[in-house]
Amino acid sequence: MKTFRGKLSGMKRNYKFIDLFSGAGGFSRGFEEAGFRSILAVENHPAVSKTYKENFPKAIVLSEDIKRINIDVISKYIEQPENIDVIIASPPCEPFTGANPKRQKHPIDRLYRDPAGQLFLHAIRIIGEVQPRIFFIENVKGVLVNEIRNAIRKELSRYGYRNIYFNILKAEDHGVPSKRTRVFISNIRLNLEKEPQVTVEEALERLPPPGSPYPFNHEYTTLSPSKMRKLECLKWGKSLIKYMGAGGKKLPNLIRLDPRYPAPTVLGSSQFIHPYENRLLTVREQARLMGFPDYHVFLGSKDIQYNQVGEAVPPPLAYRISRRTIEFLENHTPNPLNSPRQR
């Protein structure tokens, strides 16, 4: 499955970025494929930070609590952090998503009272301290609730970012073979052209049987005998089990994929049944549903690997965002994008 079209030629300079809450590096993968250079990443989970370092060996990777990161810490690792062009960030979505049955009842509490929600504010703080020309904060549509949206605008305005855009993008419209609607909060508007959708069939084509020497992360994952018996009769698009989300809503899991369409949303907790075989998808197959190239590897236990895939920004979508970012950086004067810092 082809996921990228290659780096832009004739770039005026080597643009640099920082990745906060980097995870396995899906967001970074798209930016690097377009010609950006990852300078520093922050990821608190040790196994996940090792995954990032494995895939981006030239980047400095801090396996550290984001609350302990500030401009002074960053300056110890990066000369002239004021020259960072872009910051990308993917703070935890659990405080805001409807899939979380423990989500705070009052929207504003999801940002200011939930400890995980407060991490979003730390992403804003670091953006404010570093003052990149462009930033992107990725999260679920739950941040579009008026109280949360207004609070985010207010927090960013403290650092001089006044024109803020809540860009809603559907990954399946931009080369990703799975459905995923996400908000990219930024100081630039993202107007991306839609592209033909990629199906599950196309995403999984030409993969060898699980257990082959290559690609990595392509081993069988077992199910209990009782579930194995049930899935034999499972039709395309139907789920083997359901789990409880916010507000008592039941959500499907262990879905038999329909090969004719993009897959449902890949989550850290979700797994899928192969469309033609009575088995779970491997980590590599699940990564293909997110548009990861086969050379991007995942470390840690198998559960951690699945989580890394499901919690990532799909690389093809990140790639298209990065190409749009380059257009802005190359075609505007140093301070056109409402960044408070003059160059």
Image (cartoon, helix red, strand yellow):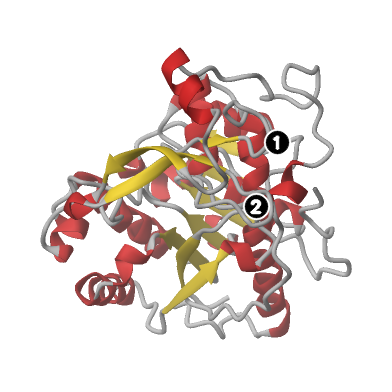
Residue sitting at the far front: 233
Q: Amino acid at mark 2?
A: Pro
Q: Residue at x 41, y 84 (%)?
A: 163
Q: Position of residue 180 (x, y in %)?
A: 51, 58
Question: Mark on residue 225?
Answer: none
Note whether 270 is above or below 130 in the view shown.
Answer: above
Vertical comparison of 262 with 235: above or below: below
Residue 39: percent from left, percent from top: 62, 47
Above or below — where is 42 with respect to 191?
above
Image side of residue 29 versus residue 343, left or right:
right
Q: Nearer the viewer, residue 283 or 343?
A: 283
Which quadrant of the view contains residue 166?
Answer: bottom left
Crowd class of label 2 (few under 14; some 14 to 19; many from 20; radius 10 Å): many
Q: Position of residue 220 (x, y in %)?
A: 63, 19
Q: Amino acid at mark 1?
A: His
Helix, strand or loop status at disc 2: helix
Which residue is identified by label 1? Answer: 296
> In the rendering, at what x and y percent does residue 193 appear?
68, 78
* In the displayed structure image, the side of residue 252 where residue 116 appears, left or right: left
Instruction: Tell me the distance, in whole angstroms, between the alpha carbons under discs 1 and 2.
Output: 10 Å
| Sequence-first tag of 1 and 2 | 1
Name the residue that disc number 2 marks.
315
Position above or below: 177 against 164: above
Residue 267 in the figure: left or right of residue 98: right
Is residue 335 in view?
A: yes
Q: Secondary structure at mark 1?
A: loop
Q: Residue furthest top?
A: 225
Residue 37 appears in view: no
Q: Are marks 1 and 2 in contact (CB under 8 Å)?
A: yes
85 vs 139, nearest the viewer: 139
Q: Residues within 10 Å of mark 1 (few under 14, many from 20)?
A: many
Q: Residue at x 61, y 31 (%)?
A: 281
